[in-house]
Image: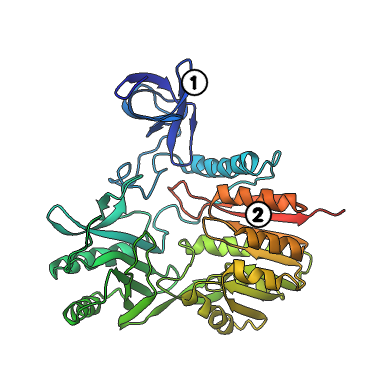
Amino acid sequence: MIQGDKIRVTIADLNNEGEGVVRAGEERFVIFVPDALPGEEVEARIVSKKKNYGTAKVIRRISESPLRTPPNCGAFGRCGGCQLQHISYDAQLELKRRTVFDALTRIGEITNPNVLECVPSPQRWGCRNKASLPAQSLRGENLRAGFYRPRSHDIIPYSNCPVLLPKINQNLRELLAALREEGFCGVKEGGRPQPHELIRHIVVRQAQFGEDSLCAVVGRRPLAKKEENKLRSIAEKIAGFSGMVYNINEASGNFIWGSRTVSLFGEERMSEQLGRYKFTFEASSFFQVNSAQARNLYEYASELALAGGADRILELYSGVGSLTVFLAAGGAEVTAVESWQPAAKYIAVNAGRNGIKKIIPHTAQAEDIAGSLSGNRYGVVVVDPPRSGCDEKVLAAILKIAPERIVYVSCNPATLARDTKRLAEGGYALSLARPFDMFPQTGHVESVVLMSRVQK
């Protein structure tokens, strides 16, 4: 089997990228086939072959799975933002439950983990409250903004995205048209940037349960006065924006945000309502992208943490204090730790505006402060780390604290499973895992895991 060969296969499985999986030939070689579902017989051409796996492209679909559904976006398959639009929603939920189960079994080495059904998103479309569009200048096009093609930095131009809140789509279309009309340029991939190249990213956030909408333009250098005036004028003309900021990121790499932000128009921050509570945050702060589902997740995680009457909780990776408020509202004293200063400064602000007093905020790296806090008594530790999971120092500190329960909120089943294995080795057992569909139409899944200390 070599590149270019045609094969006729029946798809056996599906990965969380929405790709069909099949083992072909006598050697049972693994091949990933985009746009092919389990049970479908397809004729495909080998696109690439590596040592341990290959990829193939469907030429002809001989039979069709009952799970298949028409995609809701013309860019599906080219844009890397969604992977599962061609699969029924019930099948998406089961795939996400199985993804968590498989990770805990294979990586976490937990036998038959108790993984509950995936909680469906309240909205399957028009639910994401944030759009982050990389911007480039290429092939005579001064400003191409959109979403990356799968496994590349090639941008599929944005025109409309059905998973975004409708107000974001409206604001984005007006913003991009105005930026192009005023001659703003993206940044070329590779090579030395030219003086006229400016915009690296465009971020628009919209409250689902409110009117606030905040725009951030991320550039590679400080603005010239003429550029600043043009951006301010654009923001003033777009009725949907309550504020616009300009963020300066002169560093190389893929991280969106730089350390300096300049206000151009209106408000520098925005608010969102989650149930009874209202939260304020800036453009660069972490806030769950699906507001309605975030409320469900926070209510569930806080119920697990507060069960049994915990009076003191340590929460690491706290963001702007959204989950913190849900925890403290149940009566516990919460020590909340967040490293990103633009987010951490709102922990106390959000506690105060919601009438919550029993919160002790810290601005620090979790791995730096966890050791010093490990001498304190906490009945529960709650963590909500980035995709990379918890630092080993954090896990060691948690084991030293030896809380009765650990509630782990995760956006990455692989690092979740890695960390649960480490905690299990330290004397904890997995009680349950509950997936939440925070990202409909994509392969991403959020999870809440409860681990309990094994009584000796």
How crowded pointer 2 is (Cα within 10 Å; few <14, some 14-19, many 20+) is rated as many
The structure residue drawn at horizontal position 22% and vertical position 68%, both measured from the top left corner, is 198
Name the residue carrying label 1. 28
Label 1 sits on a secondary structure element that is loop
Q: Amino acid at mark 2?
A: Val
Q: Nearer the viewer, residue 428 or 307?
A: 428
Residue 134 position (above or below residue 355): above
**In the image, farthest residue toward the top:** 26
* Residue 31 on image: x %, y %: 43, 28
User: Mark 1 and mark 2 in contact (Cβ < 8 Å)?
Assistant: no
Q: Which mark is residue 449?
A: 2
- Expressed as whole percent of the image width and height from the top left, the position of residue 15 reads 48, 37
Q: Residues within 10 Å of mark 1 (few under 14, many from 20)?
A: few
Could one spot residue 430 in this view of the protein?
Answer: no
Three-letter amino acid code of the residue under disc 1 = Arg
Q: Is residue 12 above or below residue 267?
A: above
The earlier-in-sequence mark between 2 and 1 is 1
> Regarding mark 2 in the picture, which secondary structure is present there?
strand
Residue at figure coordinates x 35%, y 42% from the top left: 71
Q: Which mark is residue 208?
A: none
Say whether residue 118 is left or right of residue 262.
right
User: Residue placed at 42% from the left, 73% from the top?
Assistant: 210
- Disc 2 or disc 1, which is closer to the eye? 1
Residue 36, image quadrant = top left
